[in-house]
Image (cartoon, helix red, strand yellow):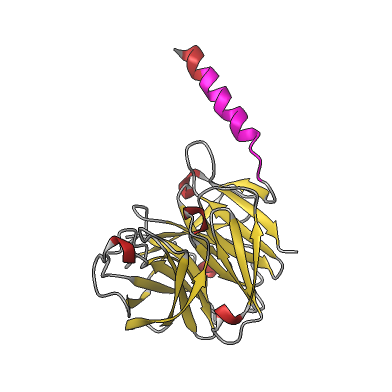
Amino acid sequence: MNHFKILAFLAIFLLWSCEDYGQLKKIQHLPATLKEVSGMEKFPKSDLIWMINDSGNKNILYGLQPGNSTLKTIAITNAENKDWEDLARDTSGNLYIGDFGNNRNKREDLVIYKVKNPEGNTSGKTTATKIIFALEDQTEYPPKRKNRNFDIEAFVHLNGNLYLFTKNRSSKSNGVSKIYRLTDQPGESTAELIGEFQSCKKKSCWITGAAVSPDRKRLALLTNKSVHIISDFKDDNFTTGKTTHLEFGHNSQKESIIFKDDSTIYVADEQTGAFGRNLYEFSLN
């Protein structure tokens, strides 16, 4: 039995070590704590990357220095992780945690937690204010399968507002990701539908993460195997901007994206079997 276990381990190891990452540069294999990493963000002039896990995991922010396996942990004491899906930041030093994962399109308790930049936190815990919201065009919980386009896994902060992008789970998906605008102020609010982004109809084209460049001029929308870069948009008219579609040459459960700088992105994927749970770098040039 032990002989077979050793052979199985060696086979998995060889497959893992020989994996082709396409155009992605693997930075590191993430700590096991981050096996379901679903969002990340970083602040200017800092190399520390903040990460979260999605549903069923702890209400904790994890700070990672790329190349290092030691994590800084900050517990959000008044928050529950029902389905944390993405992180965003504003230019005033606030971090936003999107608890809006909605696979079955039936949640009526969508919330975004707002916390101060946790980098200087030495206590290991903090509290958040809450932005409680509903989507203006959702009236059924859940809607019919053909109308299930209310799951959210991606958002950004830009020009004083939060912008949310749906993951289209409708039974006959047309590849449309809906775009909502939401206030960044705590309290109860309604997210306003302001547009749509057209992706392809396959599941591998679902929008799973979003990020804004440090100069605030480019928007990145992540899929399992590629990234859409939107530039030259005015205000929040993203659909009127120029869209460039870049393939990674690698397909995995990628749900996390941030800009390292204006021309480079970091991407992370969840662990699936013996694969994934990696941090990658990708050049946009």
Residue 18 is situated, as x and y percent measured from the top left of the image, at 66, 34
The correct choice, above or below, for 35 with respect to 48 in the image is above
Residue 5 in picture, x, y percent from top left = 48, 19
Quadrant housing residue 151: bottom left
Report whether residue 195 is seen. yes
Q: Is residue 166 left or right of residue 22?
A: left
State the residue at coordinates (49%, 55%): 202
Which quarter shows the C terminus?
bottom right
Instruction: Say which residue appears at 48% left-offset and 59% top-offset.
Output: 201
Q: Is 74 drawn above or below residue 278 in the view shown?
A: below
- In percent of width and height, residue 271 lies at 49, 44
Q: Name the spot of residue 102 as percent of width and height, x first.
A: 34, 62
| Residue 91 visible (yes or no) | no
State whether the magenta stretch is mostly helix, strand or loop. Answer: helix
Nearest the camera: 232 or 200? 200
- Which is more toward the observer, 25 or 76? 25
Establish if 165 lies above or below 251. below
Which residue is painted at 30% across and 64% down in the image?
105
Count the labels in the image. 0
In the rendered image, residue 102 lying in the magenta stretch gets the answer no
For residue 130, above or below residue 79:
below
Q: Residue at horizontal 57%, vertical 61%?
A: 257
Residue 20 on the magenta segment: yes
- Location of the N terminus by quadrant is top left
6 sits left or right of 231 in the view: left
Chain part drawn in magenta = 6-21
Farthest residue in the right direction?
285
